[in-house]
Every structure is written in structure tokens, then in C-alpha cells.
Image (cartoon, grey):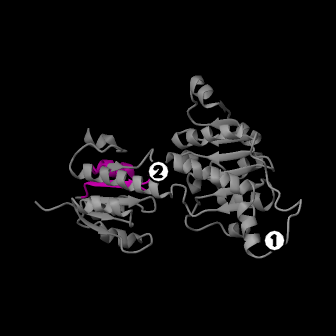
Amino acid sequence: MSKPKVYVTRRLPQKALDMISAECEMEVNPYDRVLTKEELAEAVKGIDGLLCLLTDTIDEDLLDVNPALKVIANYAVGYNNIDIKACTERGIPVSNTPGVLTDTTADFAWTLLMVTARRVVEADRFTRAGKYKGWGPMMFLGGDIYGKTLGVIGMGRIGQSFAKRARGFNMNVIYYDAYRRTSEEEKKWGIKYKEIDTLLEEADFVSLHVPLIPETEHLIGEKELKLMKKTAYLINTARGPIVDEKALMEALKNGEIAGAGLDVYEEEPELASGLTELDNVTLAPHIASASIETRTKMAEMAVENLLAGLKGQDMSNIINKEVFK
């Protein structure tokens, strides 16, 4: 019996690729970039399984290229890049990689919060440029973190992990989520529920941890940014379109908020014009989960889902379970 054919849309940690090649005929995107729509369409022809990334758009047009596709494994927690309804209609199970990157992403959200508040990147550029001529009492004054109010929008796995870390900074943690947690959970985690407008008005730091769905697109726009304190900071490690990037740029430029730390962008990898010219924003290239351990675990999880789906077995992290009903 011939081995199933699999296409991987970007090179992954070798351990994961070895897992696939041991059981399948495998082809991997040979380029160190996202495939074009045409290249991806050509790649999926004749394959049984697809291991894709958040940067790959899996829509009806692509699915129609290969009606025999059996399974899709997404190397990400989010799956807004995939038309789940279209996959379900075609009987294609889709999986993601939840849980494994929770703590790593929470760590990085704190990294962005701290380096933005204390102007570390700006100070690093200053020092490297040979401008540091000695200590001064007014150099790179930033914002304190200890004892401040932290606003967390989205209290899922990552939001919870992020909020727990605030205990070490003796912060007052307030949160907003579409589903309010129980009083027992709020007491256990040391968090207080606030409506989103109230949270924005009260928080010294606002960190976003919601999925990208129609209801959260531009959740933070001009109106919401004007509600924030002029001394407040916005952190986004979730999804770019949750924030109206042009409105954020104007708020930063006009001093409506003190600063922002971004790991994701509305038109990724493109940035809003003028954003890179601002000193009060820290810009990272979508690396919140980028630790060796986590990226390897993500890859292994995606492969395990892929192989299980190809064998007709239960996929641990299937998104559309209804395909098997």
C-alpha cells in the first residue's frame, strides 16, 4: 500500500518532519517565505494531508483544487485562516495546537509590557548609536509597573496565564471577557470583572488575549483608545485586526496613550504607514510563541493530529468534530 502524501507549507523543527517522513510521502515548501495563492494551489494537488500555518489562506477555492484532501492540521492556536464551514461541508477534519503555547505567549506579552513601559528598545538604540555620554536624571523616563492596574481583555488560557503573572508585581487585575468567570474563579485568580469601557478607563496597562472573530475585529479603535489614560500602554500578542492600526498610530503620535507593544499587525506583515517612525511603540515580528521548546511542541502536536486524521483516528485537537457525525 502506498504511503499518504503530505504537504507542509513551511519548514518546521526537524523532529516533526521526521515524524511525517517515517509514515508519509512528504514535500515541504522549499522557500523561506509564505507561498503565493497560486503556489499553494499547485502544492495541494494530489495530496492527502496538509499541514499549514496561520499565514496560509485555506478557502473554498483552494479546497476545490483537491476534492480528495482528507485532513488539515493548522500549526497555530487560531484558525481564522481556514474556512472551517467549507472544510466541514467537504468532510475534512481540521485541527489546531491549543495549550502548548499558553505560557510562552504569556511570557512574551509581559516582555512587551515591560520593555515598552521602560523604553528598553529606544534606550538600546540610543546606546548602540554611541549617544550615551553618562547618567542623567531625566534620561528615558518610563512608567512603573509594580502596583499599577492591569486590564486583561480575554480571559481564556493565555489571558489567565498572563494575569497570574501580575501577582508578582502586586497589580490590581481587572478583566473583560464575553463570558464572565465564576465568583470562585475570580477570587482564586485575584481578578475583577469590568465592562470593557470601564476597563479601558481604569487600566494603566491593557493587554489583548481574545481570538479574531467578527465580533473582535477592531475591538480597539479610535473610540476605545480615547477612553484610555494618557499614561496607559496597549499590548497586543493576539491578532492584528483586533486593533485599528491606523487609529492606534494616531493615538501614539498625538500622545493619547503613552505607548504600545505589538507582536501582530492588521495587514501582517505590512505595518500601517508611519508606525515604524514612532519611538513609543515596540514592534516584534510575531514571535510570542517563538521559543525552541514551544515551537517544537507545536510542530509535534500538529503532526500527531495530521497522522491521526490520515489514519481515520481521533484527532486530539479537532476543531470541527461534526465531520464525524
Judge by depth and name the residue closer to the eye, 102 or 228. 102
Q: Is residue 277 above or below residue 208?
A: below
Q: Is residue 159 above or below residue 302?
A: above
- Give the percent coordinates (x, y) of residue 231: 80, 50
Residue 264 - label: none
Residue 24 as seen in the image, left or right of residue 38? left
Residue 140 as seen in the image, left or right of residue 70? right
Is residue 42 part of the magenta span, yes or no? no
Residue 132 - label: 1
As drawn, the residue found furthest toward the top would be 184
**Residue kind at label 1, given as amino acid type:** Tyr
Residue depicted at 44% across the width and 69% down the height: 34
Q: Is residue 206 above or below residue 251?
A: above
- Asked which secondary structure carries label 2, the reply is loop
Residue depicted at 41% across the width and 56% down the height: 296
Residue depicted at 56% across the width and 41% down the height: 161
Residue 78 - label: 2
Q: Residues within 10 Å of mark 2 (few under 14, many from 20)?
A: some
- Give the percent coordinates (x, y) of residue 176: 63, 37
Q: What is the span of residues highlighted in magenta in the rendered image?
A: 69-93
Q: Earlier in the sequence, mark 1 or mark 2?
A: 2
As drawn, the residue found furthest toward the right would be 137
Is residue 88 part of the magenta span, yes or no? yes
